Image: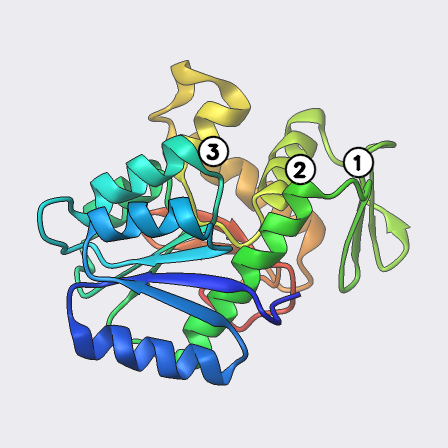
Amino acid sequence: MSQGARILVVDDEPQIRRSLQVSLEKKNYVVMTAASGEEALEAMVHRPPDVVIVDLVLPLIDGIELTRRIRERSPVPIIVLSAIGDERKKVEALESGADDYVTKPFGMEELSARIRSALRRSVMLTGAEPVFKSGALSVNFERRVVLLDGNAVKLTPTEYDLLKYMIQQTGKVLTHRTLLTAIWGEAYADQAQYLRVFIGQLRKKLERNTARPRYILTDPGVGYRFAPEASEDSQ
């Protein structure tokens, strides 16, 4: 799936653009680069990418505004890559339309894993496959049936809706506000504790070890993401 995928790297530092281009091309990606938001938007018109990697600090159009503009015209996965690790900036970037956020310094294997996850999600959103499978977990969206190790898992309607929404956004970091608004509506947008209760209930039913979840991962202070494969990531 990732072979030949086109990636647009947007960063105003030439050495970072070059480093990412070399590293990603070694992994068989087709890489385009842009030094500014204006260059990125122009590049997308001529050769639409499969994934966009955006630095937050850019001249004229910053990364958050660029993310907004890209999202207005395209559903392409966007990964924000920045040395700014402030949680408020993470939330702002994600709520502007970014799918994920990687903080510098970072390892190429981590970035590659995030890219693969973004590509998987993109395929899921455009595909017609009614059954989602990941390890021991299987979800039939047509029948609303959830199986774990072949055994039926009884979910409440709200738990199911929350799980389905997260699976449909696989690999994407979803802020508390995004999840609360999508499942419960605007009136619940600030009820983070409400969300934590339901996440806890889902983990009890789906995770073998709730202290080290495989599927529903936490981005501290920001939100949650659904991981399609077993992971050693955050609790």
Locate residue 195, reporting x and y percent. 47, 34
Q: Report the Cα–Cα distance between label 3 and label 2.
A: 11 Å
Find the distance from the CA under tag 1 to the CA under tag 2.
8 Å
The x and y percentages for residue 87 are 23, 51
Q: Is residue 103 left or right of residue 169?
A: left
Task: Locate residue 51, reporting x and y percent.
Answer: 46, 56
User: Which SS class for mark 3?
Assistant: helix
Where in the figure is residue 35, as x and y percent of width and height? 20, 61
Q: Which residue is mark 2?
A: 164
Instruction: Check the picture and name the quadrant holding the N terminus.
Output: bottom right
Labelled disc at residue 179: 3
Up the image or down, 225 lies above or below 104; here it is above
Amino acid type at circle 3 is Leu
Q: Residue at x 60, y 34 (%)?
A: 162
What is the C-alpha distance between the residues marked 3 and 1? 19 Å
Foreground pick, 223 / 75: 75
Query: Going by the image, does 13 lie left or right of 78?
Result: left
